[in-house]
Image (cartoon, rainbow, N blue to C red):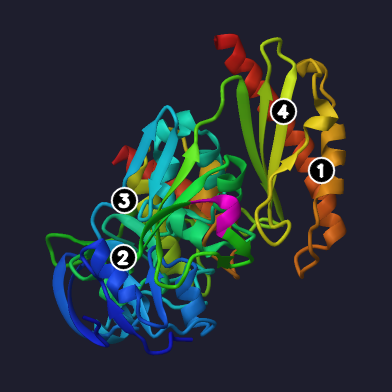
Amino acid sequence: MKPAPFRYADPRALDEALALLSEDGAKVLAGGQSLLPLLSMRLAAPAVLVDINRVPGLDAIEVDDTGVRVGALVRHSTLLADEGAARVQPLLARATANVAHPAIRNRGTTVGSIAHADPSGEMTSVLALTDGTVTVASAAGTEVLGWRDFFVGPLETSIPGGAVVTSAFFPALPQRSGTAFAEIARRKGDYAVCGAGVVVTLDGDRRVESARASYVSVGLTPEVHDLTDAVAGAPVEQADWAAAGELARTLVDPDTDIHASADYRRLLVGVLTERTLASAAAEAVAGATRE
Amino acid sequence: MTDTERTITVTVNGVPREATVPVRRLLSDALRHDLGLTGTHVGCEHGVCGACTVIVDGDPVRSCLMLAVQVDGSEVRTVEGLAREDHQGGQVLHPVQEAFRECHALQCGFCTPGFLMTIAAGLEERDNSVELTEEDVDDMVGGNLCRCTGYANIKKAVHHAAAAMRDA
């Protein structure tokens, strides 16, 4: 199918884009890898498409000790290849490698996928797990929103129609911490039936200080689950990651769809949690040893 | 400030082309209908099958997931631009095309243009002196669907082409 008729503009400045977006029925076009299918299937029919691809200054990845700021036009493939970003927050490259296929990653943007707020998206759950924020620009000015205030429901965020997310900020991985990210999908690059991202932090005596997880395709909006109770204080070599997996299964509330039942997803949450926590813990140990 | 139709200039396979298109025209349709390049095939039209893959400014992308107006000023390579001309006015197939013929990597041929562009871009941008693993190949072609071959010969052709490009 073909998109329904719309009007199109490709502004060369952010304030111009914001002026265009103030019209009723206007929609931002960035990477377009989710929006174009919606247009072609006529699930969306905006009156005006505001293509921000030619707005300067939105394509930067800024890395410092505090974290990684990703501009609205940074493609998944660019973030995936950014060594500085991967060093400061390893979850970025790990999760991005699971986003679709190379041809999709070449166009799709990390910030666009966050603004799309798809519960099957990887980067929404990474924003949550790292306790990230988004910067939102509108005619009224610029504001910074925490992820909890941003995600409202599936494919729904709290920002008004005339606003655009100009960047996302992912805080740096804390010291003595490790991360892991894994997905189960029917085919490589498909939407995950279930995905898990985790962060394990150790204390100075190599005991587990905290273990947190966020899931993909589980629940309607991104959530972070604290699994520390199952493993708190355990020497890292003896931590019972299976118990943490069991705990995770009781905390999540997955849905049934044509790809998997809720029970199967809950099972996968347990399996992936155990696996990823063990791998993240090994990384945290390796990091602590280097210190 | 907003348009419903635009005239775009785009370099396709090294040749500057101009077309006046409705702004809602997909790049895949513009290539086929406005520029007459029907080698790019349109399968699912929502980014799942990969048949319409072309190379825009050096990167493989789904042409059904871009608007034609977005490539104004860009360089596009399609399957028609893979082979190069020899001195006698004939054509020399790209190593990936040669490998597809050699390895019997196509049957009905519908998905083939997308595979060729995906693999050509994938092999051209990588360092072929580094050994290509099965996982690399899966990663490269995993986004393209083929309902005839079962993929075994396509994957064989990727290795074959990589070897040819390394030795070239």
- Left or right of A7? Residue A211 is right
Who is closer to the viewer here, A250 or B107?
Answer: A250
Alpha carbon of mark 2 to alpha carbon of mark 1: how far? 40 Å
Q: Which residue occupies 30% across, 63% down?
A: A53
Quick one: label 1, few (<14), some, or many (20+) residues within 10 Å? many
Numbered disc in front, either 3 or 4: 4
Give the Cα separation between the discs numbered 1 and 3: 37 Å
Work out whether residue A121 or residue A275 is closer to the camera in this orientation and state it: A121
Give the labeled residue for mark 1.
A248
In the displayed structure, would residue A34 be above or below residue A219? Answer: below
Q: Chain of mark 4?
A: A
The residue indicated by pointer 2 is A52
Q: Which mark is residue A59?
A: 3
The boundaries of the magenta stretch are: A145-150
Indicate the chain on which mark 1 is placed: A
- Residue that badge 4 annotates: A210
Q: Chain of mark 3?
A: A
Residue B91 falls in which quadrant of the image? bottom left
Q: Is residue A99 visible?
A: yes
Residue A50: x and y in percent read: 33, 73
